[in-house]
Image (cartoon, rainbow, N blue to C red):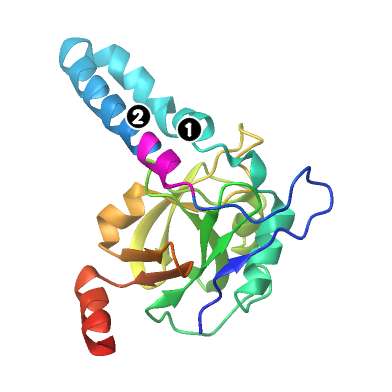
Amino acid sequence: MPVKYIKCPSKTRKSDNFVEFDAGNQRSIKSIMLCSHFAVKRLRSILPSVAKRFLEDYPSRFVGEALWLEDILREDLVFISESLGQPYLAETKDEPKFPVSGLVYSATNGRRCVNLIVERGKKKIYVPFIIDSGSPTNLISEDALAALGLTDYIPKQLNVTLHGFKSITLNYSADNKKLKDINLLGYQFFQVTKTYESFNAESMELTLHKSMAEFLKTVSTQK
């Protein structure tokens, strides 16, 4: 039985009550992204040098402004990871499996979360990710980078094997205090891997499937 909907344990918050999943916000973010995508495409055709400078800083600026991630702190990721059955950033010998059961974390905005295996070199750890396909990019936190052995030199971008998918690009936003503790799966991840997220707003069940075909197969066997 998948974990469904959990309450924020923090007593420092003004409100830690259950909240409903705000699908409207997600649609708004995707609409903003779509407009931005065509605006940048048009800008590139007219003023290539200006477009290049904008795109160099586009992912970190856009994510910070659009996703309102102030409600997720390091302590939240620790709690989310443990709620999903793994210590925070625990090393593992497990092999990635699908489907992956996630949860909806109700700190403020009903964040959809999953624990996935990240591999780099000989290091293999569980990392709690927030899912937001409205984000144009994927993010990895400073803690996760350290757990992967990156302490002396921290790159702004690296490729990892993410739950069995090779060469997935993760970005580290060192200059943005709101994002440096965040692990996030954005549109980039779903575009490359073709994984499929199913979310039942009535039962609050969240599942990440390896593909839409696998999801449809699961649904057909449940009938």
Q: Which residue is nearer to you in this view: 83 or 90? A: 83
Tell me residue 143's x, y (percent): 66, 55
Tell me residue 56's x, y (percent): 39, 27
Taking the image as shown, residue 134 lies to the left or right of residue 71, namely: left
Q: Residue at x 67, y 73 (%)?
A: 82
* Span highlighted in magenta in the image: 22-28
Question: Which amino acid type corresponds to the residue marked 1 in the rendered image?
Answer: Ala
Residue ranking furthest to the front: 202
Q: On the image, numbered disc 2 is attached to which residue?
A: 32
Element assignment for label 1:
helix
Question: Which amino acid type corresponds to the residue marked 2 in the rendered image?
Answer: Ile
First reached walking from the N terminus: tag 1 or tag 2: 2
Residue ranking furthest to the left: 45
Q: On the image, numbered disc 1 is attached to which residue?
A: 66
Main SS type for the magenta part? helix
Real-space Cα distance between discs 1 and 2? 9 Å
